[in-house]
Image: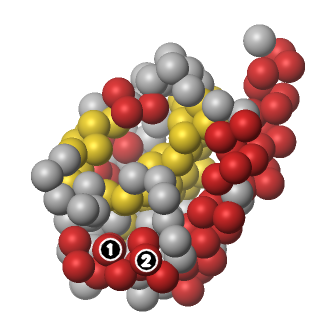
Amino acid sequence: MTVLSNGDLFPNLSVPAVGGGTLIDLPEVLTGSYGVVLIYRGSWCPYCNAQLASFSRATDELTARDAQVVALSVDGEATSADLAEKHRIAFPLGHSADADKVAEATGAFTNDDPTYLQSTGFVLGPDGRILTAVYSSGAIGRLAPDDVIGFIDHAKSQA
């Protein structure tokens, strides 16, 4: 397992997107904008639901800062589509992620039985490099939109 550090280039990952027919290719889909990558435990997790709903509500504020959000989990497509509809998620939502592959590439913690990824979040610069990473080994500890917005504002002021 490789824990990613600030300044590292986000690894190449591809996951199927809700809606079918396309892949979410990271970090390419975020290149040129600030990026937020949210790895969430699953639609059954109340903390993940709250996080995804809050990022969905913050879409306009994030867009105003030239920031894009992508989220992914091991959930299947139907479950992920239901979650996207429930929270009106307009940002790309990946499904059926290979937990071992994602964990190996990003350093995300996993749960073994059942298998899922623990909450992990990254804020990327427009060049795809990690500006900050948040790793959780359990249910709590994750990125919040207000923190990300403030962080991006600060990063832009320092550029």
Find residue 102 and report its horizontal and vertical position in percent. 28, 51
Q: Taking 7 as reference, is 153 above or below it? A: below
Q: Could you tell me which secondary element the residue under label 1 belongs to? A: helix
Q: Residue furthest top?
A: 159
Q: Could you tell me which secondary element the residue under label 2 belongs to? A: helix
Which comes sooner in the sequence, label 1 or label 2?
A: 1
Residue at horizontal 45 percent and vertical 24 percent from the top: 31
Find residue 38 and report its horizontal and vertical position in percent. 49, 55
At label 2, counting other C-alpha atoms closer than 10 Å, the crowd grade (few under 14, some 14-19, many 20 or more) is few
Name the quadrant of the C terminus: top right
Residue under pointer 2? 85
Residue at horizontal 28 percent and vertical 44 percent from the top: 24
Do the residues bearing badges 1 and 2 touch, measured as CB atoms within 8 Å?
Answer: no
In this rendering, the label closer to the viewer, 1 or 2: 2
At label 1, counting other C-alpha atoms closer than 10 Å, the crowd grade (few under 14, some 14-19, many 20 or more) is many
Q: Quadrant of residue 83?
A: bottom left
Q: Quadrant of residue 52?
A: bottom right
Seen from the viewer's position, the closer of residues 26 and 98 is 26
Q: Taking 95 as reference, is 128 above or below it? A: above
Residue under pointer 1? 80
Residue 16: image tag: none
Say what amino acid the circle numbered 2 marks.
Answer: Glu
Say what amino acid the circle numbered 1 marks.
Answer: Ser
Find residue 139 and report its horizontal and vertical position in percent. 55, 78
Residue at horizontal 52 percent and vertical 71 percent from the top: 88
Residue at horizontal 40 percent and vertical 53 percent from the top: 92
Q: Can the viewer see residue 94?
A: yes
| Residue 59 shown left or right of residue 28 in the figure | right
Q: Taking 127 as reference, is 20 above or below it? A: below
Instruction: Report the number of discs.
Output: 2
Seen from the viewer's position, the closer of residues 57 and 13 is 57
| Residue 90 shown left or right of residue 55 in the figure | left
